[in-house]
Image (spheres, rainbow, N blue to C red):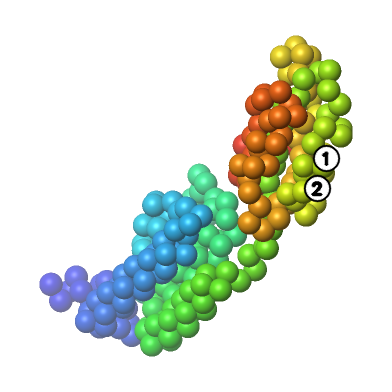
């Protein structure tokens, strides 16, 4: 048993210290994961990503413990990681920041700086929570993509301009195409709605202009992922 333990323990850490590091890694991983879930309740979060945030600090801490001061082992692990291919990447820049958050905590824990890792996690978590509470950098207006189907006998250029001026701070006609074999137009607008603008009221007014044909109002960031709109 002593031979097995001596082969896996680091030169500078005992078994009890390693268990403390791994336990701290799990605790911090859960804390960061819960922080991610809390700050993404309104916008939605990916459960698998929340689980990943729990695992990352432990994985990084174990890697650092395995490497220790062994340069050859470090190069071996680096070579092993070069063959990994990630199937997907976080779409939200905040998700990437959370990954670096967990990586930094895992590195500190793997090096044995548990106090630094805890302080770093607490301070950054407080900053993130405060930014979420005070809605830091949240725009005062919302950006949407408005798709309006218009009969071919109507002028799509000026049909709803006065309605958009009433409910938006700015708007721009982005694209027009024909649908149903040229019987209809589909006009695509980039719209920046005023704060607390009544979206249903705006759509109802547009319906009276386009003959109650199809109208779509989508958040711009999600629309860009689903459709390719030529610039």
Q: Is residue 105 visible?
A: yes
Q: Nearer the viewer, residue 167 or 76?
A: 167
- Quadrant hosting residue 139: bottom right
* Quadrant where the N terminus is found in the figure: bottom left
Q: Nearer the viewer, residue 26 or 196?
A: 196
Element assignment for label 1: helix
The answer to whether residue 132 is above or below residue 207 is: below
The answer to whether residue 133 is above or below residue 84 is: below
Crowd tier of the residue under label 2, counting other residues whose Cα lies within 10 Å: few below 14, some 14–19, many 20 or above: some
Residue position for label 1? 161
Element assignment for label 2: helix
The answer to whether residue 28 is above or below residue 59 is: below
As measured in the structure, the alpha-carbon distance from the residue carrying label 1 to the one carrying label 2 is 6 Å
Tell me if 208 is positioned left or right of 122 in this view. right
- Quadrant hosting residue 140: bottom right
Tell me if 8 is positioned left or right of 220 in this view. left
In the rendered image, the residue lying farthest to the left is: 1
The residue depicted at 79 percent of the width and 14 percent of the height is 182
The residue depicted at 48 percent of the width and 57 percent of the height is 42
Q: Nearer the viewer, residue 54 or 6?
A: 54
Tell me if 95 is positioned left or right of 167 in this view. left
The residue depicted at 57 percent of the width and 55 percent of the height is 92
Q: Give residue 161's position: percent from left, percent from top.
A: 83, 40
The answer to whether residue 108 is above or below residue 84 is: below
Q: Nearer the viewer, residue 151 or 228?
A: 151
Residue position for label 2? 165
The residue depicted at 86 percent of the width and 34 percent of the height is 158
Q: Give residue 54's position: percent from left, percent from top.
A: 36, 63
In the rendered image, the residue lying farthest to the bottom is: 115
* Quadrant where the C terminus is found in the figure: top right
Q: Which mark is residue 66?
A: none
Q: Give residue 136's position: percent from left, percent from top.
A: 61, 71
């Amino acid at each position: 048993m002593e031979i097995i333990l001596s082969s896996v323990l680091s030169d500078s850490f005992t078994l009890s210290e390693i268990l403390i590091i791994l336990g701290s890694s799990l605790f911090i991983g859960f804390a960061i994961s819960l922080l991610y879930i809390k700050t993404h309740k309104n916008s939605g979060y990916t459960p698998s990503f929340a689980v990943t945030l729990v695992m990352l600090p432990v994985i990084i801490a174990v890697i650092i413990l395995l490497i220790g001061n062994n340069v050859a082992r470090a190069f071996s692990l680096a070579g092993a990681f070069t063959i990994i291919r990630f199937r997907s990447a976080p779409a939200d820049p905040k998700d990437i920041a959370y990954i670096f958050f967990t990586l930094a905590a895992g590195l500190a824990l793997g090096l044995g700086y548990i106090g630094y890792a805890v302080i770093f996690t607490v301070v950054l978590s407080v900053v993130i929570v405060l930014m979420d509470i005070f809605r830091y950098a949240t725009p005062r207006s919302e950006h949407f993509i408005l798709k309006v189907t218009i009969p071919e006998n109507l002028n799509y250029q000026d049909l709803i301009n006065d309605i958009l001026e009433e409910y938006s701070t700015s708007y721009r006609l982005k694209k027009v195409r024909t649908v149903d074999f040229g019987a209809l137009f589909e006009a695509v607008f980039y719209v920046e709605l005023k704060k607390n603008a009544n979206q249903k009221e705006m759509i109802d007014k547009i319906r009276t202009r386009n003959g109650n044909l199809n109208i779509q109002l989508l958040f711009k960031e999600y629309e860009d992922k689903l459709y390719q709109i030529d610039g």
